[in-house]
Amino acid sequence: MLVEFKVGNYRSFREEQTLSLVASNDTELPGNCVDQGKLRLLKTVGIYGPNASGKSNLINALSTMQEIIEKPAKPGKKLPVTPFKLDDKYSKKPSSFEAIFYHKKIRYQYGFTATSERIYDEWLYAYPEGRLKDIAQTWFKRKFNKKTGKTDWNFGSYLKGEKEKLKDRAINNVLLLSVGAQWNNKQLTIVYEWFVEKLRVMPSDVRWLPVTSRILTDAKEASTEFGKHLNEWIIDLLKTADLGICGIDAKQIKPEDIRFPEELSPEDKGIIVESLKKSPKFDIKTLHHDVTGKKDIYFQMKDESEGTQRYFELLGPCLETIAKSFTAVFDELERSLHPLLTRKIVELIQNSNFEKSVPQLIFATHDTTLLDPELFRRDQIWFTEKNEENATQLYSMADYKERRPRKKEAMQKGYLSGRYGAVPIIEAFELNG
């Protein structure tokens, strides 16, 4: 589970900002929290703010951190880092990323700073379970020395393995964490696993239809305990969402199912077959009853409404989040959805009681109907707002000092009236003929 994420000098973030999932001392809705080690963490967090205030940039920062870790840059290639461009003091400084998280009962603190050209700093600390004092174990630190043009390294005794070889392979634009996973360092691989296998970041421009489709069509997955649950859940949730859907017919399109035109060359056929192997395609049909209720009618998923397609594509990632203890991060969670369906998605993860699973949801949204004290605690609501210098500020409702929200107050009304900030200030404008 994610404990905390920090980002600085990245896109609209100038000074370092912190998103914390550590629960406050608030006693409201205790079921919205879960104990992890010595901490009490929030299961879900919603992020609100006007357009262009930095909500998507926060999610993109997590995605960028994940990408740099998972896909090490080739020699000479630039890193996908964009600094705060509205201040010359920051435009050439490195961006910073840090995540604190629990994985396999150990709390880790990992981060790095980087420009598009190189890694400047990188650090990893661990807090093993069972220690009397919450003191960090230093596994490694690196720091680029501008004067010498070289990287200084500091390895702690807690990190095992051939450190010198790993250090030599961590070139200017590659993280030691990535190198450690590539070369099978057991300790670093476990940390790497969380970013690659447990953190699922879903920007608004990425469609997740294949995830839900794969769950429904993967016979190997369906034979597992999780697979059976996921398959049944998807169909049941579609049936109960008042979409008119009575069932689903799903299959993966295989090369032998394709009828190629006779004039198509063997080379072109081969390209199509290889494409299907790399990016599987699916044939998804929804079942409806006709007006008599006696005849089954099938529709292609693409012929369903945008909202139905969106709900369908979200079910797979959300249910996998529950079954496999993911930390899922969504941008524009409510896009094309009725507010009640958006709430249903949130409640699925927040109220899940799947055995041995601790899912977590972070999402950016404009859906103010979710600002409900029966659904969320005050520390679960976060805001992005730009200051006078157009830099994003990030804060929670629980930390809002000027007009501290009262328990059980009407959150939605208070937010829309500007009580907590983070709403657009729209100037008067008239069209005159």
Image (spheres, grey):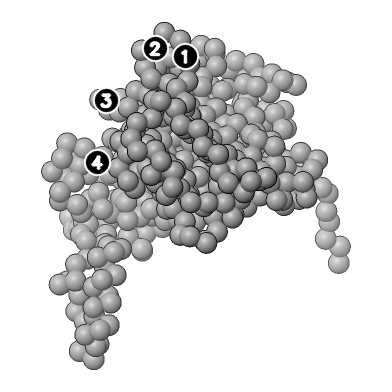
Instruction: Give the image location of residue 19, x and y in percent.
Output: 57, 31
As measured in the structure, the alpha-carbon distance from the residue carrying label 1 to the one carrying label 2 is 7 Å
Q: Earlier in the sequence, mark 1 or mark 3?
A: 1
Q: Earlier in the sequence, mark 4 or mark 3?
A: 4
Q: What secondary structure is found at the residue carrying circle 1?
A: loop
Q: Are marks 3 and 2 in contact (CB under 8 Å)?
A: no
Q: Foreground: 52 or 182?
A: 182
As measured in the structure, the alpha-carbon distance from the residue carrying label 3 to the one carrying label 2 is 23 Å
Q: Foreground: 319 or 129?
A: 129
Mark 2, residue position: 131
Residue depth check, mark 4 versus mark 1: number of the one nearer the observer: 1
Mark 1, residue position: 134
- Relative side of 98 to 270, left or right: right
Mark 3, residue position: 356
* Residue at (13% x, 43% y) in the render: 223
Q: Are marks 1 and 2 in contact (CB under 8 Å)?
A: yes
